[in-house]
Amino acid sequence: MSTIAVVTVDAGGNVPPALRIADELARRGHRIEVLGHRRQAAEIAAGGHGFRALDALDFWNSGVRRSVPAAVGEAARLAADRALEHEVGEAIRLAGADAALVDCLMASSARGARTGGAVTAVLFHTFLEYWQRSYRRGPVGLVARARGADPLAEWQHADARLVASDPALDPASGRGSRVAEAAEWVGAVEHGVAAAPDATRPPLVLASLSTTWFPGQTEAYQRILDALGSLPVRGLVTLGGLAPDHALRVPANVEVRELVPHAEVLPEASVVIGHGGHSTTMRALAHGLPAIVMPMHPMLDQPMVAAAVERAGAGLALPRTAPTARIAAAVTSALGDERLRAGATRLGERLRAADAAAAAADAIERVLAARPGRAAA
């Protein structure tokens, strides 16, 4: 069996797909060495994988409040940092890794993995349409190129490009771009079961915006709380470990908690309100739940995810600034509109039928087997 490095960063929804694929590869007998942010060490150790902290990632902290220019600069540094590139290459050599699965956020790290001697697969953890258009052509891509790394070029040089999303939702699927033609959609990695709410109790509405702070997020939480307080529902609001800017007014029928494992809540929920993060949204949809999506940041994938959910007839898109009455009306619609519930049910069945982690592991084993002098097994 082979040694496979997983190169990642603690940026929220990008981590679960990488670790699910790592778990599948480990189940097949491969040795996994995760290269990432030092605060990920305990989580990785609990999963039974090897871990090496990358010193060059110490600048990154997605949980702190940052201006837009600062956020762009840090994201571009993550994509194009020479020190990170060199450290990844050296870690690959020290681990004796045969292959590396590299987060697409870390374009220059994919180059480092290649120079370290590993065959390389790049993991796209949301729609490819976002990465090759909004991200690469937007401010982050422009600054990354100025720093010496073109994300598109680095992705194209990889031996495999794996999109951990549903191809029917991703606008890039079937398009003729160079990246899309060589990409493989393995499906959404998020797990789920068909939700079965308790019909004897008021419906449970879960609201969870992001583990990354965005301007206006506290105000959005307050409008969601006020909306849920006006309805005959049970509300659960999770803050993703982020402290609000100011104290929240919490209605009697709503509970606010800092962190809750969504897998414990979603099977009994009826509706999810989210920010359009790919991981949170796909996890809700994998349970067959209608999603109300309120994108928190216009430059990220969130508006694209919201539009895709609405196009699929599985939820509703609202602006971040939606007033309380509009949020309440959307929740009422998601609870009572049979077309929305049927759309979410169909999409949930499709997502659950895919084994994305296995498909990604298959792809990595194929590029390993194709390398002269190497074999996956």
Image (cartoon, rainbow, N blue to C red):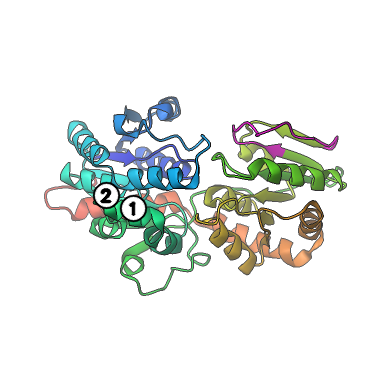
Is label 1 in contact with label 2 (beta carbons under 8 Å)?
yes
On the image, the x and y values in percent for residue 15 come to: 45, 41
* The C terminus sits in image quarter: top left
Q: Position of residue 337 (x, y in %)?
A: 79, 64
Looking at the image, the residue that sits furthest to the left is 373
Vertical side of 265 occupied by 154: above or below: below
Q: Residues within 10 Å of mark 2 (few under 14, many from 20)?
A: some
Question: Is residue 345 or residue 328 the one in the foreground?
Answer: 328
Q: Residue at x 53, y 52 (%)?
A: 278
In the image: residue 15, left or right of residue 55: right
Secondary element at image label 1 = helix
Residue 95 seen in the current view: yes
Q: Which mark is residue 147?
A: 2
Q: Amino acid at mark 1?
A: Val
- Dominant secondary structure, magenta: loop
Which label was assigned to residue 12?
none
The stretch of residues the image draws in magenta is 237-253
Judging depth in this view, the residue of 244 and 105 nearest the camera is 244
Residue depicted at 33% across the width and 44% down the height: 77
Residue hosting label 1: 143
**Quadrant assignment, res 10:** top left
In the picture, the quarter occupied by the N terminus is top left
Determine which quarter of the picture holds residue 55.
Answer: top left
Q: In this rendering, would 99 be left or right of 124?
A: left
Task: Identify which residue, 277 or 96, lies in the foreground.
Answer: 277
Q: Does residue 146 appear to the left or right of 279 in the view shown?
A: left
**Residue 239 in magenta stretch:** yes
Residue occupying the point 34% across, 57% down: 142
